[in-house]
Amino acid sequence: MEAAVFILSLVDCCALIFLAVYFIITLSDLECDYINARACCSKLNRWVVPELVGQALSTVLMLVSLHWFVFLLNLPVAAWNMYRVWKVPMGNMGVFDPTEIHNRGQLKSHMKESMIKLGFHLLCFFIYLYR
Amino acid sequence: MRPVLVLVPIAGPPQQPAPPARHMGLSYPSLPPGYQNTSASPMHHPMQAQTQPYSHLSAGPAQLSPSLAGLSLQSQTPETLRVVNLLQERNLLPPGPVTPPTPCLPQDLQKINCHPEVFRSTLTSIPQTQSLLNKAKLPLGLLLHPFKDLSQLPVVTSSTIVRCRSCRTYINPFVTFLDQRRWKCNLCYRVNDVPEEFMYNPVSRSYGEPHKRPEVQNATIEFIAPSEYMLRPPQPAVYLFVLDVSHNAVETGYLDVVCQSLLENINALPGDSRTKIGFISFDSTIHFYNLQEGLAQPQMLIVSDIEDIFLPTPDSLLVNLNECKELVQDLLKSLPQMFGKTMETQSALGPALQAAFKLLSPTGGRVSVFQTQLPKLGVGALKSREDPNQRASAKDIPNLSPATDFYKKLALDCSGQQVAVDLFLLSSQYCDLASLACISRYSAGSVYYYPSYQQQHNPAGVECFQKDLKRYLTRKIGLEAVMRIRCTKGLSIHTFHGNFFVRSTDLLSLPNVNPDAGFAVQMSIEENLVDMQSVSFQAALLYTSSKGERRIRVHTMCLPVVNSLSDIFAGADVQAITGLLASMAVDRSVTSSLSDARDAMTNASIDSLTSYRTSVLTIQQPGLLAPACLKLFPLYILALLKQKAFRTGTSTRLDDRVFAMCQLKYQPLAYVMLMIHPALYRVDDLTDEWILLNRQMDNMNTINCNPDFLTQVLGVPDYAAVPQNMNILPELDTAESQRTRAFVGWLREQRPFFPILHVIRDESPLKASFMQNMIEDRTESALSYYEFLLHVQQQVSK
């Protein structure tokens, strides 16, 4: 049972790692002018909710299997994802808005956020692997 | 919106040469008008003014550059750093308009530098490091007006346009020529070769002097672009008019004005033989007009399926203007009567915009949308979000951001197809301008707003609309444009303000560019600017003219680099700083809240004055000390806080507020300053009159009026006979009447929109809006200037 939970979380974590890498690659493409803002934002917006679902799944799994420490580790990230989606103003086209992405250093802050998530997911991956 | 034009009572435009900045001239009366003694005021000469309409532009502060050219900045305190105690010196405003500061460059460079009306920086001396900039607590940014109507514009037709190989900067007056064959880019410092064709100078017919060519002698220049600069053959000018014809719209009577105006100006629309025109009208259904050549009269096609808009015929909805002119004129003559008896009350704006987009997407062009009510049908339907009880709220104003992303998405689609949408909102009710304005904001269109537009009840508003429409139809237009702003290595741009879509890091997509649009950007210093004497900025606007020529307008500006805080303060441009702060505050009120934005503005003045006091001042005196170049800063901040966009506590309609915010971000700096800090003129020196040119209003307050003025200028026998709503100055035969009318006419010519003249009696309801522009006075909900200064001083001395 333990093993099943952890294997599932491992797979989930893998998916989240790939997703974080995809975000980073797309954002850096935008920075280097390989794609335009609208294409980039529509690609990224598509994956915001799946990422949220994946992270929430991982958190709930930990909760259900009563691994408190790991659960508490995952909770802030899940909460932050949900907050991010909830905070989008009504006039914006999703978390990544093509009209705002070049303003106020949003591109850089999104990039930083994705890097942090990547690091976090890698950490979680190794935790699950060795548990 | 007409910007407020209030200069504190000055004598009018400055006499040449400009008086030195130290002489404060006219005292700002702290007494209300009528009690003021008129003795010391210089005469105002409107006739003189008419011959020098741009005198305030060219009367640059020449007093600064000769004294500072070549001088090290540390050797003597320049005029701009003279310490001013704001609490004591009350006569701060100069007798002429506030002139922009001159950068401290060598004389020969400064002479060819870009004109400040076109390109302006908040700090004319750029700090060397980001930490130094942070210490100064002033924003660093550029304000541009790239497509301004210029009286003199050198145009170059050259087979080769010389550009730097790595950063693609256009060659400009501030590059260095290493020898005759090589030049060094001033933005990325790469050494490039001079092409053979460039060695020959066609103007002076000489060879071997590339630095004498016009591209290297002029900071503002226009190139005719060869075909490498075109993605597709240059498009023709295409104009589409989308008209609201619901019952409400017909009641306002705007349709007559629009059709009349189009009929009069049909030959003056910018374009050539390929110009196309089309019309769509809508209420709860969409009406297209088949204007095919050969038809006896225009044919109306109605599409009532607004959920799924389609174009009823594939062509002849947009027709060539020259070939089908009679049909177009027939349509314009019959349009107002066609809908005279309509009973449709709903407006389906969203579907109409989608139809317009479908019609224009093959070619691109300009859509002019006229809307008179809240759109409630079809996609993009909006709800009424304003709570009338919240208008005078002293706390936060909600609903400043768009309610739906439909208009933004459509604007981005339009931008991709080179279609710009201009919005004319003529309505007396709430129309959710916050959402509707998105359609113009991201497609590089403009927003015009006429609250309470009504043909019978507001004839002055009608005249205003007519004049604005005439300017709108006949002004220059640039199509399928992009603009790129480049700066020297080490500086980078991080935020943009204005109506456009930022397609990539510094590329602005402008489907239409017009002479009344201004842009602003904020910069940060990524790498320290060591070993650099000066930095340059270049704005290049690539556009298709209405005649189908692809052109590039290039503006280049050069500014010195300094590494001491006092030099930074010496070069601060207070008007540019205020303009940039206004745009930043609009962004802040939309993303976080209005009270945050207000606090941020107040803190901007407090922080910069604190920084001045702690770092630059050597002697600490009591009072609120500011450098001479920033002495107007608290006044302008207070003016911003009292501006319609940001004021709290006074009842402001949400649409009015949102429109004021749009204008603060969209207009070029000169008009933004007029909006923020209006000009107050004394009409002539025989009487105690003040003219206040206000947003859409020229007001003449007639308290304690000299009876001569009444008879000779206003044409009434006594004060009691001044009519309540006087909007025109009667044409009397007296010298005073002529002078006054000439002055008002000159003031009106100064700006691209048409202000309405109001003569206000003391008891008139318009007096309240007049008094609101008296920024230094106290109102129920806001501080007076002196109180604000005290508040700032308290915070600074903490």
Image: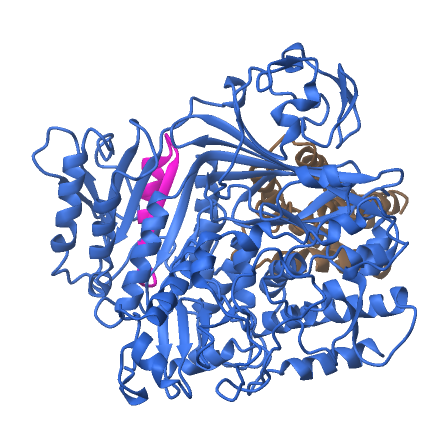
Chain colours: A brown, B blue
Q: Magenta segment, which residues?
A: B352-376
- Describe residue B722's horizontal placement relative to residue B300 as left or right: right
Q: Is residue B380 above or below residue B204?
A: below
- Describe residue B797's horizontal placement relative to residue B359 as left or right: right
Which of B20/A87 is in front? B20
**Residue at the farthest right position:** B618
Camera sees residue B90: yes
The magenta stretch spans residue A19: no
Which of B584/B537 is in front? B537
Question: x and y percent of residue B128 in the render?
Answer: 85, 47
Question: x and y percent of residue B12 in the render?
Answer: 51, 65
| Residue found 75% across the figure and 32% down from its top | B187
**Residue at the farthest top position:** B196
Which of B279/B749 is in front? B749
**Residue at the farthest left position:** B296
Camera sees residue B170: no
Which of B372/B80 is in front? B80
| Residue found 22% across the figure and 30% down from its top | B322
Question: x and y percent of residue B29 in the render?
Answer: 58, 81
- Describe residue B113's horizontal placement relative to residue B83 as left or right: left
Q: Quadrant of the N terminus of chain B?
A: bottom left
Q: Is residue B585 above or below residue B442?
A: below
| Residue found 40% across the figure and 69% down from its top | B697
Question: x and y percent of residue A19 in the render?
Answer: 70, 40
Q: Quadrant of the C terminus of chain B?
A: bottom right
Q: Is residue B500 above or below residue B188?
A: below
Question: How many numbered marks, from 0 up?
Answer: 0
The magenta stretch spans residue B363: yes
- Describe residue B745's horizontal placement relative to residue A41 as left or right: left
| Residue found 37% across the figure and 88% down from its top | B763
Q: Is residue B651 above or below residue B373?
A: below
